[in-house]
Image (cartoon, helix red, strand yellow):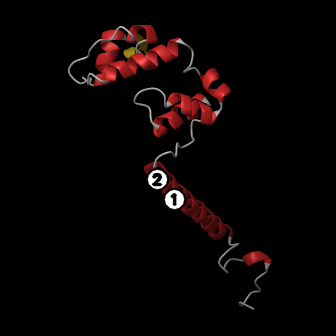
Amino acid sequence: MRLRERLNATLGTGFEVAGRIVGCLPSPTRLLQLRTLSPGLPAERVPRLHAVAQRAIEGRLGCDHIRALGQRAAEAELMTLPGIGPFYSQLISVRASGLDDALPVAEAISRERGAALRGARGQRRRLRRFRRAMATGSGLGGGAHSRGRRQVAGGH
């Protein structure tokens, strides 16, 4: 059983969804009751989880609070949590702001992968334009109406 599943089984709540019991992470109050979860949870993570739980109880992890701070201030505040660095502070602030498809770019690997995706998107866009041009005969000098010019029978 994975760590998250054990945490759910130990302190979380289960909900029936489509005939299956689905585990839900423990509430912040229940998470504060955690002392150890062996095997798998390193001892230094318990205080980190407690800090997150306490911050949530104080209302400082809610979407409204994070949005009210603004992205930079929210990221700075989130990074005061033990174990939360630039990547996760951006991820949390982006998600809390409702930007579910934004990419946190605090770390080089994120920027590199984002650039690769943008390049792939650009290639897909160019390929779509090429296919559209081929399908309509409006590009690459071929077709009946190449770039607005009429082709005369016989190629003249």
Q: Position of residue 59 (x, y in %)?
A: 57, 15
Q: Position of residue 128 (x, y in %)?
A: 60, 61
Q: Is residue 13 something that shows in the picture?
A: no
Q: Is residue 17 something that shows in the picture?
A: yes
Indicate the quadrant where residue 8 lies: top left
Kindly identify which residue carries mark 1.
Answer: 120
- Compare marks 2 and 1 and give the one earlier in the sequence: 2
Q: Position of residue 21 (x, y in %)?
A: 37, 14
Kindly identify which residue carries mark 2.
Answer: 113
Q: Position of residue 89 (x, y in %)?
A: 50, 34
Indicate the quadrant where residue 135 lies: bottom right
Label 2 vs label 1, nearer the camera: 2
Front position in the image: 57 or 5 = 57
Q: Residues within 10 Å of mark 2 (few under 14, many from 20)?
A: few
- Marks 2 & 1, CB-CB < 8 Å contact: no
Quadrant housing the C terminus: bottom right
Q: Residue at x 56, y 19 (%)?
A: 60
Q: Secondary structure at mark 2?
A: helix
Number of numbered discs visible in the structure rendering: 2
Q: Secondary structure at mark 1?
A: helix
Q: Is residue 90 left or right of residue 53?
A: right
